[in-house]
Image: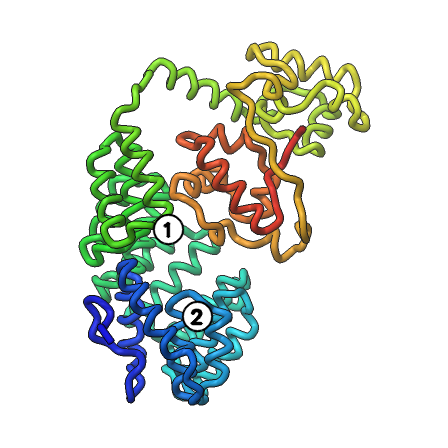
Amino acid sequence: MEQTAELQINLFREQMPSMEEIRMLSHLVHSSEINQLRFAEQVEQNLNSTSAVASLEAGIGLFILGRYREAIAKLQKGPDGKEKFLYLGFACRRIRKYDEAIQNLQRAKESGAEALNVSLEKVATYRHAGNLEAAAKEIKSCSNFQNVSAEYHYQLARLREAEGLYDDAVTNYKKALELAPTHQRSLFHLAYRCDLSGYEDQAIEYYKQVVAGSPTYVSALLNLAVLYEDRGEFEKASACVDKVLESHPNHPRAVLFYKDVESSKTMFYDEEREKKRSRKNQILETPISDFELSVRSRNCLRKMNIRTLGDLLNITEAELLSYKNFGETSLREIKAILDQKSLRLGQALEDKQLQVETTPERVGTAEDKGLMNRSVDDIQMSVRARKCLQKLNLRTLGELTRTTDAELLGCKNFGVTSLNEIKKALTTYGLSLRSLE
């Protein structure tokens, strides 16, 4: 059978490839759509083999393809060994079975896997599970690898980011790159951190280094394209998207982005209109706490989760008056504030320029504490949307669900496309943004 393009590593050979060879195989399989298709054919042809070794090979192949539950079923039939337990740990982590992932990683260590590698994978697993205390304890046990292991500093940086210690994270990403200049994940996340923090020039330079070392690093190319598009450098943005589409012609995000960039090239820019829109957004973002209100009015608004002028535009007089302890005096106070800005209660429900889409009712176990404490980093979204959440200091799904459409739309460079992107992501968890209607 024809080997996967640009690939000389055969997973299904007499002797199992090394862990490093398997990692290289995974990287090359995902470097292009054609490689994925051809590798998928190889895996399918070996799924019917019943030997233990064949089950192990097929399980690893299924994991590489992202078919995690199938991978677990196959791996469980494979012979015990570090490869089996490591990939069981990886697959369990991908489907959020974190306790099982930790157990399998420990068994991998007992089967001869490198102790440092196992410990750092445990750190990553605890971090994904939101158990930052356990992650910190685990990585502390590896502290003798400080200034020695690039992977140690990379995992420490990811942990510091999860803890909100962004400067420490950047320091550790840079240390990882000092130790291993080609550590692509450190380079990408350093670029991403600069991107989220608003250091766009630095982010662009780091993303360019990522792309130079790995021409098909899709996330880096698309993030770089976003930055170029925001700067009006549409030809450079197009070049980034074109590189993605050369290897992944059906990549959904790249296809949509290509259309957006091409439209932007011919889009008429009304500077005066944009200035007015920016001023309007600034007004809508104004916190209620900036105004002088009675204690009763302030307490009522806080209990109703009304935090900005934009929130007030999404609620009617009748709804305010129906709230306990909210009377005519408080209503007059609120209306006086809005009059100063030429706004009125319920305006967003009538004004098409301010109106936003309604969100579906929350379903499922939305009040589950673990779910609500999950990091927003778990949501797949564009850099632009993620930047907005960063600026608004929204770190968990719970905090995001207490935010309104108007608050998000009030964030600079955040539009309806990004809003719908976040809404769609939340519905996969049975959640939605806060609605004042």
Name the side, left or right, on which 330 lies relative to 48.
Answer: right
Q: Quadrant of the N terminus?
A: bottom left
* Percent of width and height locating residue 370: 62, 57
Residue nearest the observer in this picture, 341 or 8: 8
Tell me the kind of residue under disc 2.
Ile
* Percent of width and height locating residue 132: 52, 62
Residue 428 vertical placement versus 273 (above, below): below
* Percent of width and height locating residue 250: 33, 50
Residue nearest the observer in this picture, 230 or 51: 51
Circle 1 residue: 167
Q: Quadrant of the C terminus?
A: top right
Q: Are marks 1 and 2 in contact (CB under 8 Å)?
A: no
Q: First in sequence: mark 1 or mark 2?
A: 2
Secondary structure at numbered mark 1? helix
Can residue 232 be seen by looking at this rendering? yes
Name the residue rendered at 23%, 50% in the picture: 246
How far is the residue under mark 1 from the one under mark 2? 18 Å
Circle 2 residue: 139
Name the side, left or right, on which 269 lies relative to 2.
Answer: right
Tell me the kind of residue under disc 1.
Asp
* Percent of width and height locating residue 243: 22, 48
Name the residue rendered at 32%, 51% in the picture: 219
